[in-house]
Image (cartoon, rainbow, N blue to C red):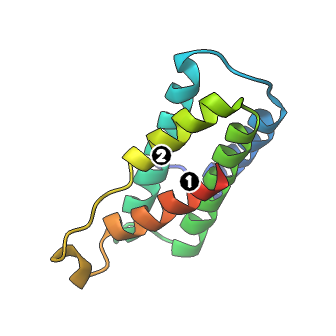
Amino acid sequence: MTNAAASIRIGIATVLQRIVSKSGTSIGPLVLGIFHSLLKRLRVSVEFQQSRQCPSVDEEKAFQRTLMDAMGDFANALPDYQKIEIMLLTASNIPIITQEERKGKTSDEILQKVLVKTLLKV
C-alpha cells in the first residue's frame, strides 16, 4: 500500500472527515473526483489488508472505517442530486463475485462488503 503506518493514515482520514463534514455544497465534477479518490484508497486498503505485508489487520480495518465515515459525512453535506451521483459511483465499484470466487475469501468479497457499508453511510 504505502509506507505510511496505519495510525498515520487513520489520522489523515480523521482530519479529512472533519474537514468534509464542515464543508458546504461542492460544485461540478470535483465531487465525483474526490469521492472516486476515496473509493480508490478504500480498495487499495482492502487489498493491502489481504496481503502478507499488512502488519495489523485491525488497524487497517480502523482506517477503512474512518474512510467510510469520511465519505458518509462528505455525502451528507451535499444536495440530494449529488448524493445520488455518489451512490451510483459507489455501486458501480462494487465487484461482482463469481461462484468460483466464493470458495475462498477473496479481497473482492471483502471489498464488496466494505463498499456496501459505504453505500449505506451515504
Question: Where's residue 22, x and y in %?
Answer: 84, 33
Residue beneath disc 2: 90
Q: Quadrant of residue 15?
A: top right
- 44 sits left or right of 70 in the view: left
Q: Residue at coordinates 25% horizontally, 79% vertically from top-left? A: 102
Q: Residue at coordinates 64% horizontally, 48% vertically from top-left? A: 122
Classify mark 1: helix, strand or loop. Answer: helix
Q: Residue at coordinates 35% horizontally, 70% vertically from top-left? A: 109
- 116 sits left or right of 7 in the view: left
Classify mark 2: helix, strand or loop. Answer: helix
Q: Residue at coordinates 47% horizontally, 41% vertically from top-left? A: 88
Tell me the kind of residue under disc 1.
Answer: Leu
Question: Where's residue 3, x and y in %?
Answer: 47, 49
Residue beneath disc 1: 119
Tell me the kind of residue under disc 2.
Answer: Thr
User: Counting other residues with Cα less than 10 Å from the Cα at mark 1, is it few (<14), some (14-19), or many (20 or more)?
Assistant: some
- Between 35 and 58, the residue placed more toward the observer is 35
Single out the residue that lies furthest toward the right. 22
